[in-house]
Amino acid sequence: MTKQQLIYENVQAVKERIQNAAKKAGRNPEDIHLVAATKMNDAECVKAAIKAGIKIAGENRVQELVEKYEQKAYDGAELHFIGSLQTNKVKFLVGKVSLIQSVDSEKLAGVIAKYAQKNKISQDILLEVNIAKEASKGGIYPEVLPQIIENLCNIDGLRIRGLMAIPPISHFTGENLYHFDKMRQLFIDISQKKYDNVSIDFLSMGMSGDFEDAISCGSNMVRVGTAIFGARPYMIK
């Protein structure tokens, strides 16, 4: 079986798992957005995933995104940035990606707004929440999130579209249900508030190892890499 054929089969399998998880949770499978996490996969693999039916590609590294963008790897799909982002690399993304999912500070959001204003566009973003308050991870702590949204909602060039979270690495099914539930409640609470320039549409949480649990807790955007493309080189021992 070729790599392209394997990717095709994997995409169909992931879609089926999403459908089953959504139905089990009493949700409409069409409400769940599948983002193919394309980190460390070349342009041909990305093209194969899009050909297999992927509608959103998510890139973790700015340099990879720029290289594959020039190779037209993402043609036919929406492009998101889903990795850790330094302020000095924002200029390479604004105007190329439709959504920056990993905005983990007010400072980063301000830099994104500056480049969006310069490009005369409004950049859609998700605010990344450090739901488990892990010292090793970036992200906004839940208790300060409302104030940060309040501070950002009137800045030209930004449109807050929802929340994103990366809970602790899970080693067994159900391990992150507690964190996913907390994110769902936070998402509901924020959605009920009225802000200018804020449309809380997306709750992005769940990856290859736990996206079904995330869907059961209300996620409507899952970021799946390994289950589509196979293990990345650094994951193979």
Image (tube, rainbow, N blue to C red):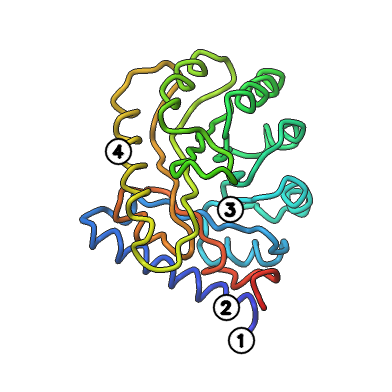
Cβ atoms under marks 2 and 1 closer than 8 Å: yes
User: Badge 3 is on which residue?
Assistant: 57
Residue 126, disc: none
User: Badge 4 is on which residue?
Assistant: 185
Closest to the observer: 79 or 225? 225
Gap between marks 2 and 4, in whole Å? 37 Å
Cβ atoms under marks 1 and 3 closer than 8 Å: no
Q: Residue at x 70, y 66 (%)?
A: 44
Is 85 rendered above or below residue 213?
Answer: above
- Horizontal side of 88 relative to 143 (left or right) equals right
Q: Quadrant of the C terminus?
A: bottom right
User: Badge 1 is on which residue?
Assistant: 1
The percent position of residue 142, horizontal first and vertical second, equals: 42, 33
Question: Which residue type does callout 4 highlight?
Answer: Gln
Q: Residue at x 33, y 51 (%)?
A: 178
Question: Which comes sooner in the sequence, label 3 or label 4?
Answer: 3
The percent position of residue 48, horizontal first and vertical second, equals: 62, 67
